[in-house]
Amino acid sequence: MDAVFKALADGSRRKLLDALHDDNGQTLTQLCAQLDMTRQAVTKHLLLLEAANLVATLRHGREKLHYLNPVPLQEIYGRWIEKYERPRLQGLGALKKNLEANKKEHHHGKA
Amino acid sequence: MEKPKFVYVTYIRTTPVKLWEALTQPEQTRQYWGGLFNRSDWAKGSKWEHVNEKDSDPVYIFGEVLESNPPTRLVMTWVDPDDPKDDSVVTLELQPIDDLVRLTVIHGDFKDGSAMQGKISKGWPLVLSSLKSFLETGNSIDIMGSARTCQ
């Protein structure tokens, strides 16, 4: 998880992830065209992102494509957000169920 | 050939055989897929189904097994029963690295305007983090609860 936060703690790397979110599966050349950086610098950032498992690469014909891999972000979400949100959302779910049940009864009463 | 649309990777502390079982045995898939499960004999040419038994219309996804090489590679079509034209292809690759297994999910060959694309891009990260948790700790994640938070 340290690697994920380290990888995210840089504007250029976040920009690379944004570029992949907009258009998943890009070559190094395509990514370089969107950033004001040398090819070497982009390569270095991509390696760091790949080491953090935020970017996955795939051979497609002769090309090496880069993909945004959100699985580590899902793990962070699960650890700090989801488990705190769930009781509140379940509360809302129960409220909705009750209200809808009442509505149904009311509706039946009318009919 | 068009480039795949999505590639998901997770590293799980397990063995390829255990991971293969977790991906293919109904009782195991149920543990981390929010109570829904997958069933098939997983032979090439066989049908597979993603099932919610509690629903009167229980098959949520189905498809054909295109390639089956336990415990390293499984390729299948992925079809929405409500819109059978909305089909795509899923490839699962299991690669051992030291005491970990790298699981890669490649999902592509979507039809133009596929509604499934939006659903699976939320679904796979949830399922994979739940699977990792299930295999490493024995606890899965309540993915139905967290799916609600996405809406």
Image (tube, coloured by chain):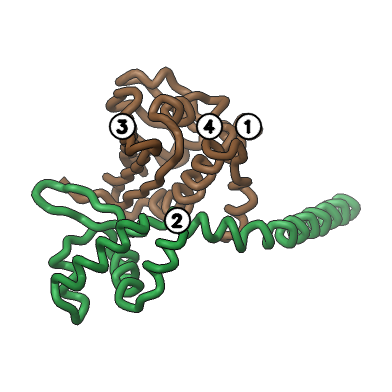
Chain colours: A green, B brown
Callout 4 secondary element: helix
In front here: B111 or A44?
Answer: A44
Instruction: Name the chain letter of the residue that bears numbered label 4.
Output: B
Residue B9: x percent and y percent?
36, 47
In front here: A26 or A52?
Answer: A52
Q: Residue furthest right?
A: A109
Residue name at image x 36 percent, y 58 percent: A52
Same chain, marks 3 and 4?
Answer: yes
Callout 1 crowding tier (Cα within 10 Å): few <14, some 14–19, many ≥20: few
Callout 4 crowding tier (Cα within 10 Å): few <14, some 14–19, many ≥20: many
Label annotation for residue B75? 3
- For marks 3 and 4, give the CA distance: 17 Å
Quadrant containing the C terminus of chain B is bottom right
Label annotation for residue B56? 1
- For marks 1 and 3, give the CA distance: 28 Å
Which amino acid, mark 4?
Answer: Thr
- For marks 2 and 4, give the CA distance: 21 Å
Instruction: Name the chain letter of the residue that bears numbered label 1.
Output: B
Mark 4 or mark 1: whose residue is earlier in sequence: 4
Instruction: Name the chain letter of the residue that bears numbered label 2.
Output: A
Residue name at image x 22 percent, y 49 percent: A58
Relative to B127, A80 lies left or right:
right
Relative height, residue B14 to residue A28 (above, below): above
Q: Which residue is mark 2?
A: A72
Residue A3: x percent and y percent?
40, 61
Q: Nearer the viewer, mark 1 or mark 2?
A: 2
- For marks 2 and 3, give the CA distance: 24 Å
